[in-house]
Image (cartoon, grey):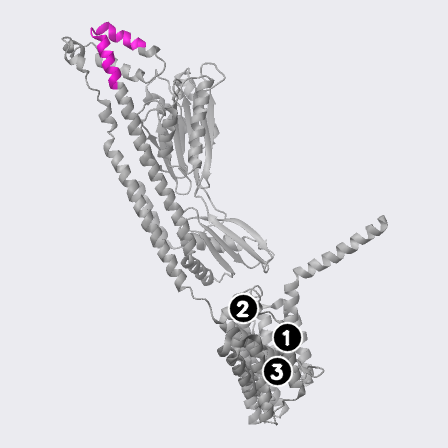
């Protein structure tokens, strides 16, 4: 049993592999059989009883578009020619040789139909000149002219009916292509005149079946047109049977008129015409073979499902899209109207809240307590050198802190100078509590306005996506297709999935590579990418390339927007106070391919709790950004959450930077963090902020600052432990600038390490956690890039960029 099993498995496996290989090559097998049969029957088609014009057009089609099937066309055509006689086969051979030679010249490739007609004229004139010893009869000369004209039209029809090999079965069918196929098929049946299976005529079955299918799919107009076409070609092919033209014409007319009764009505009407002409004209060739043939055709007609001819019906009567387009436009207008109303409401709420929130400068001015204004020591405390305003401001700073030690120390100083201490403290507590509640209320209003704005932005994006699905980017796809055609780039299909700037996605299907030196992405990188970059004015990349076999072999390319800049970063962090736990935390992560977020937080203290607090800030901020929340809204939300610590007196600074690698721009939001430094060539820029740490005060405001980046820029973000409080800020910044100047060509990691060591060596070690983050921005250089050698254009763009630099 084991031996039998071992023998059976390889045999079944080989059989399965053979079936699979045949399935994969079914397209090739079908095309081979098609060209073999078409060339065989067309080479035997005789018109006007003498002209044989159709073999060379098939050869021209195969040589131009289907070179893999030239051998089968030659075998089928020459075999069919041999049935007509040796002389006809020799004539066809000479025509093939002459056409193959002349078509190599670019001039003759401009119009293949004219080249085919000219080749037939030259060969036939020379052949008949030799056969008639220089005295070619006029009827023969006219026949040569008819043959050339018929070959010209047949070549034209063949090129319409047979597009490229990838589209021959799955390409878009048009009425013109359907008509060309019908003409070619009818011409081929004229070469089947002697093909019989018993009393059944193959050509008669095919012609009658074609008329029945035309009536089923297109009704009266289409069936009549097809029937008259068959009648005309059959009459030209055999002049003695011109009476059959009326039979075919009336068959199509009556079959189409009986379509309302279904298949049975169509078949009955077509059969009735032959019976009528049999009784009317006994000279017509309506014998038993004719009726048996149309009977076989009728049986085949009933066996063919109606669904098969539905595509033909859609070609003849395409569906109108006017109503759906109007509905799409109406829906898009309604979406715009609803979105506009909501955006106006969100803007109204935002303006209302902003008008009622006082500025930071107005909040800084603290009123003098009323108990002090009625005191006899007012001038001494507030106008002298007692320092009472400074003490009260210091008390305000410690009021919101849950640890009361610092507050008690300040109260002891106030008690030493004020004789109405209890009343003063009570009034100050009431003012601070009111200010605390007012700040929380204002912050809640601001959060509401920001959240409404974010909701409006999200709704706008969703509605734009819906409108984008409705519009389907048809105009852009047509423009892109026209650009590809103008460059002579072959393609099968173009789909634009997204046209959002910085997030474009385009799918294009092209033929397989045709040379050994090509790769799957050669055409995409060298030819298609420059077209997309010129069309959308932004860089593109080949995101994906895959070889597809269904429905035919082709390459599917996916293009997407590419970033203009690359980001390199390095981080160095040390813990202060000789501890192993640092209160600083950082994170660098991409929000998407073109946007990178950089977070740097410094928790209050140097222990594990400070580290947890800063990590909590980083984690919450990352969650907010990943949920597509606006950075300003995220900062306010984070401050609100941190202010709910209760008895935990824990705060953290936050430095948020968003680096747009597509546009080359830095957006910075700061909450109590240090300045951000940018080195650009010989210049240094600094981004500052006066915002307090998140969760520190009930009144919180944050503003965004942005700076356009250039290739080669160095960005430095650091915590406050990097600077020594005993040394002036200007001197330490000069040291930082000198380090960046000396090591500007080193890696970001090396620069960060040098900043840490040089700052410690020159200005001493601070008893605080220290973190420095260095980033370098550079241009992304694509493998292939478009160069326009236009001197005027280059000079003009150079002059403009120089003006921008000077300005």
The disc, 1 or 2, on the residue closer to the chain's N-terminal end is: 1
Relative to 394, is 669 above or below? below
Q: Magenta residues, as a range?
A: 408-431
Front residue of 336/74: it is: 336
Tell whether label 3 touches label 1 (CB within 8 Å). Answer: no
| 501, 359: nearer the viewer | 359
The answer to whether one can see residue 806 in this image is: no
Viewer-nearest of discs 2 and 3: 2
Image spot of residue 199 (x, y percent): 70, 84
Using the image, tell me which numbered label, if any, was put on residue 665: none
Residue hosting label 1? 300
Membership of 418 in magenta stretch: yes
The residue identified by callout 3 is 190
Instruction: Give the residue at mark 2.
Output: 310
Tell me the quarter of the picture where residue 143 sits: bottom right
Residue 178 picture location, percent across and down: 53, 73
Residues at discs 2 and 3 in contact (Cβ within 8 Å) = no
**Left-right relation of 207 to 452:** right
Task: Say left or right for 412 vs 184.
Answer: left
How far is mark 1 from mark 2, CA to CA?
17 Å
Q: Secondary structure at mark 1?
A: helix
């Amino acid at each position: 049993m084991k031996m039998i099993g071992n023998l059976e498995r390889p045999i079944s496996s080989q059989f399965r592999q053979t079936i699979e290989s045949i399935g994969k090559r079914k397209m090739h097998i079908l095309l081979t059989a098609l060209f073999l049969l078409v060339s065989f029957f067309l080479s035997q088609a005789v018109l006007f009883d003498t002209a044989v014009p159709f073999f060379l057009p098939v050869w021209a089609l195969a040589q131009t578009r289907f070179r893999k099937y030239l051998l089968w066309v030659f075998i089928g055509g020459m075999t069919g020619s041999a049935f007509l006689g040796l002389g006809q086969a020799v004539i066809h051979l000479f025509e093939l040789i002459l056409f193959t030679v002349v078509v190599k010249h670019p001039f003759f490739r401009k119009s293949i139909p004219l080249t085919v007609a000219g080749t037939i004229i030259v060969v036939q004139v020379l052949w008949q000149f030799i056969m008639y010893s220089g005295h070619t009869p006029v009827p023969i000369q006219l026949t040569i002219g008819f043959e050339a004209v018929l070959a010209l039209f047949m070549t034209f029809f063949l090129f319409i009916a047979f597009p490229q090999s990838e589209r021959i079965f799955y390409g878009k069918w048009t009425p013109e292509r359907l008509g060309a196929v019908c003409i070619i098929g009818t011409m081929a049946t004229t070469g089947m005149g002697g093909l019989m299976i018993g009393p059944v005529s193959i050509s008669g079955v095919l012609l009658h079946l074609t008329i029945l299918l035309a009536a089923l799919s297109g009704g009266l107009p289409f069936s009549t047109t097809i029937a008259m076409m068959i009648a005309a070609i059959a009459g030209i092919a055999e002049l003695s049977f011109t009476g059959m033209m009326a039979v075919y014409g009336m068959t199509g007319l009556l079959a189409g008129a009986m379509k309302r009764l279904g298949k049975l009505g169509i078949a009955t009407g077509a059969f009735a015409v032959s019976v009528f002409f049999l009784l009317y004209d006994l000279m017509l060739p309506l014998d038993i073979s004719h009726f048996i043939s149309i009977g076989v055709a009728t049986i085949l007609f009933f066996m063919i499902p109606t669904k098969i001819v539905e595509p033909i019906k859609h070609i003849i009567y395409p569906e109108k899209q006017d109503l759906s387009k109007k509905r799409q436009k109406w829906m898009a207008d309604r979406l715009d109207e609803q979105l506009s109303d909501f955006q106006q409401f969100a803007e109204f709420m935002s303006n209302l809240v902003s008008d009622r929130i006082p500025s930071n400068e107005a909040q800084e001015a603290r009123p003098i307590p009323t108990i002090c204004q009625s005191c006899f020591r007012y001038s001494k405390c507030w106008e002298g050198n007692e320092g009472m305003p400074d003490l009260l401001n210091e008390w305000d700073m410690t009021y919101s802190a849950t640890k009361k030690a610092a507050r008690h120390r300040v109260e002891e100083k106030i008690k030493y100078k004020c004789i109405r201490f209890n009343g003063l403290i009570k009034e100050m507590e009431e003012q601070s509590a009111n200010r605390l509640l007012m700040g929380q209320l204002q912050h809640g209003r601001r959060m509401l306005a920001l959240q409404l704005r974010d909701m409006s932005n999200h709704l706008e994006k969703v509605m734009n996506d819906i409108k984008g699905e409705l519009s389907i980017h048809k105009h852009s796809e047509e423009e892109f297709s026209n650009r590809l055609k103008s460059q002579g780039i072959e393609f099968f299909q173009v789909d634009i999935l997204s046209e959002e700037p910085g997030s474009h996605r385009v799918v294009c299907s092209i033929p397989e590579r045709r040379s050994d030196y090509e790769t799957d992405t050669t055409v995409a990188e060298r030819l298609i990418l420059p077209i997309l970059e010129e069309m959308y004015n932004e860089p593109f990349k080949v995101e994906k390339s895959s070889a597809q076999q269904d429905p035919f072999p082709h390459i599917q390319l996916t293009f997407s927007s590419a970033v203009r800049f690359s980001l390199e970063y390095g981080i160095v962090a040390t813990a202060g106070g000789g501890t192993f736990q640092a209160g600083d935390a950082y994170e660098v992560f991409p929000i998407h391919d073109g946007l990178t977020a950089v977070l740097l937080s410094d928790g209050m203290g140097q222990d594990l709790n400070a580290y947890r607090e800063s990590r909590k800030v980083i984690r919450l901020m990352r969650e907010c950004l990943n949920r597509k929340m606006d950075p300003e809204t995220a900062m306010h939300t984070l401050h609100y959450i941190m202010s709910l610590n209760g008895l935990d007196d824990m705060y953290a600074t936050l430095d948020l930077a968003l680096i747009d690698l597509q546009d080359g721009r830095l957006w910075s939001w700061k909450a109590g963090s240090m300045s951000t430094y940018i080195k650009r060539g010989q210049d240094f820029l600094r981004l500052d902020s006066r915002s307090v740490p998140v969760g520190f005060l009930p009144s919180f405001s944050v503003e965004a600052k942005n700076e356009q980046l250039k290739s080669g820029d160095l960005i430095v973000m650091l915590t406050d432990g990097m600077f020594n409080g005993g040394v002036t800020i200007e001197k330490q910044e000069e040291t930082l600038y000198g380090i960046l100047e000396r090591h500007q060509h080193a890696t970001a990691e090396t620069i960060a390490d040098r900043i840490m060591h040089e700052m410690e060596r020159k200005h001493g070690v601070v008893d605080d956690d220290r973190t420095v983050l260095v980033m370098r921005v550079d241009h992304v250089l694509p493998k292939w890039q478009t160069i326009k050698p236009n001197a005027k254009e280059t000079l003009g763009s150079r002059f403009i960029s120089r003006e921008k630099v000077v300005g």
